[in-house]
Amino acid sequence: MTSLTVIVPVFNEEQTVQESLSRLDSVDIVSKIIIVDDCSSDNSNTLIQEFIQDKKKYLLLKTPNNSGKGKAIEIAQKYIETDYLVIHDADLEYFPEDFYSMYEKIDNNNLVLGSRFIGSLTRNNLYSRTLFANYFLSKLFSLIYRNKVTDVASCYKMIPKDFFKKIKIESSGFEFEIEVLAKYLNDNDKILEVPIQYNGRSYAEGKKIKSIDGLKYIYWMFKCKK
């Protein structure tokens, strides 16, 4: 059986982090969960410690300073021992039960991407501009890398350990989403996509990605291209 670790980057998610971890708890194909607190200034760390107390499959790490999603994931890189890993944000926009359909598509160290643009699963996109931006960025990425990818901004990427452990993670923020896909396609033929659910939250509820991140995505598309 292929073993699986989940990396959970967290920054100021006190309203959602326990529910998010509770969702992960119900997924029985996960053997380890690594939580990386990116120096939250709210009550997130305390709530995490309360939740994971006496639960052996959890590991809580902390960045030395607040640096962004990419740096939080880099902190966890050396702790990956399972065959695969997947990223899960600490908000409630994604649904870990989608791991099952992604897991079924694992084959010979391939990367499996959870896409919110294929299939007919339930999706709630609050902002049309964000939807359009993701559509545009995915089209541009597909053109640059000559490989159709429908959802480059998706959090859910099931990544083989052998690939993940050897790459140098250079991005610090959300542009990690682009970096990991780009570096994978530099040395591999394609990415397999699986439909996933999505329930977008508002900025009032804590959504963090901003317009500037879209520009960073474009920069990293070209930066990572061999």
Image (cartoon, rainbow, N blue to C red):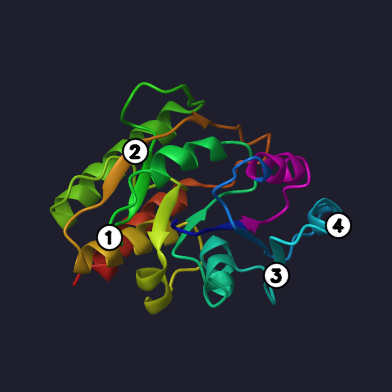
Name the one closer to the observer, 124 or 165: 165
Q: Horizontal placement of 140 versus 215: left or right? A: left
Q: Which secondary structure lies at badge 4?
A: helix
- Give the image location of residue 158, x and y in percent: 42, 53
Find numbered disc 1 in the image and state the secondary structure of the residue it sits on.
Answer: loop
Image position of 36 (left or right of 7): right
Residue at mark 1: 108
Mark 3 residue element: strand
Amino acid of disc 4: Thr
Residue tagged by mark 4? 46
How packed mark 2 is, by other alpha carbons closer than 10 Å (few <14, some 14-19, many 20 or more), is many
Does the image show residue 168?
A: no
* Callouts 4 and 2 close, C-beta under 8 Å: no
Q: Earlier in the sequence, mark 3 or mark 1?
A: 3
> Which three-letter amino acid code belongs to the residue tagged 1?
Asn
Q: Residue at x 44, y 69 (%)?
A: 171
Residue position marked by numbered label 2 in the rendering: 194
Closer to the chain start, of discs 3 and 2, is 3
The residue where tag 3 is placed is 61
Q: Amino acid at mark 3?
A: Leu
